[in-house]
């Protein structure tokens, strides 16, 4: 599967997207544990570039698209998502990210936590999103 030019691949219990931070910081995009897929924080970074600079809503949609791609590569679906965690750098972005989450998940209605943070790894990033999925 692929988002833009991001291609996910699964190696055993690990899903990789080839993103620059995965290699640089030594982590997997997602880990598959039994019937669960745990996705690392995703931002709107594609091919090493932050997309939608200044637009928290569109960054959220891109980050969730990347995260859901990892869920699917790990063998589950959007309907299996049970938890969304999101981190914003500005208070005014909570509603924008929340609107994007509501649009992406609709009737799935996963548990959700939103947290304001001092900043993310790249100052152009306005939101980072983690997703967990569990086969019921």
Image (cartoon, rainbow, N blue to C red):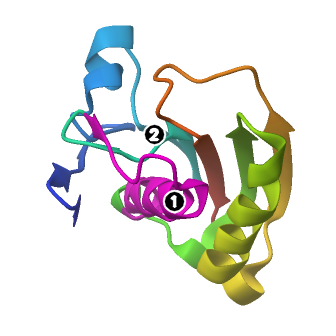
In the displayed structure image, the side of residue 64 where residue 72 appears, left or right: left
Expressed as whole percent of the image width and height from the top left, the position of residue 6 reads 20, 51
Q: Is residue 70 magenta?
A: yes
Question: Percent position (x, y) of residue 92?
Answer: 80, 51
Q: How many marks?
A: 2
In the shown orientation, is residue 1 left or right of residue 85? left
| SS under mark 1 | helix
Position of residue 65 in the picture relative to residue 50 (left or right):
right
Magenta region: 49-72
How packed mark 1 is, by other alpha carbons closer than 10 Å (few <14, some 14-19, many 20 or more), is many
The overriding secondary structure of the stretch rendered in magenta is: helix
Is residue 106 highlighted in magenta?
Answer: no
Q: CA distance from mark 1 to mark 2?
A: 13 Å
- Image location (x, y in percent) of residue 118: 74, 20
Q: Which residue shows up at 73% across the image and 77% down it? A: 102
Within 10 Å of the Cα at label 2, are there few (<14), some (14-19), or many (20+) other Cα atoms?
A: many
In the picture of the structure, the residue carrying the numbered disc 1 is: 64
Identify whether 22 is placed above or below 79: above
Q: Is residue 13 left or right of residue 123?
A: left
What residue is shown at x 49% (from left), y 63% (from top)?
A: 58
Which image quarter holds the N terminus?
bottom left
Image quarter hosting the C terminus: bottom right
User: Circle 2 sits on which residue?
Assistant: 30
Query: Camera-side residue: 74 or 60?
Result: 60
Q: Residue at x 46, y 33 (%)?
A: 124
56 or 34, which is in the foreground? 56
């Amino acid at each position: 599967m692929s988002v833009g030019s991001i291609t996910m691949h699964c190696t055993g219990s690990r899903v990789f997207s080839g993103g620059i931070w995965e290699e640089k910081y030594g982590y997997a995009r997602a880990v598959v544990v039994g019937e669960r897929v745990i996705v690392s924080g995703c931002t709107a970074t594609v091919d090493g570039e932050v997309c939608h600079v200044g637009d928290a809503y569109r960054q959220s949609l891109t980050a969730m698209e990347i995260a859901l791609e990892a869920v699917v590569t790990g063998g589950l679906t959007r309907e299996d998502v049970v938890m969304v965690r999101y981190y914003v750098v500005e208070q005014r972005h909570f509603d924008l990210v929340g609107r994007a989450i509501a649009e992406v998940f609709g009737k799935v209605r996963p548990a959700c936590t939103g947290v304001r943070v001092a900043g993310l790894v790249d100052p152009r990033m306005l939101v980072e999103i983690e997703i967990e999925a569990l086969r019921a």
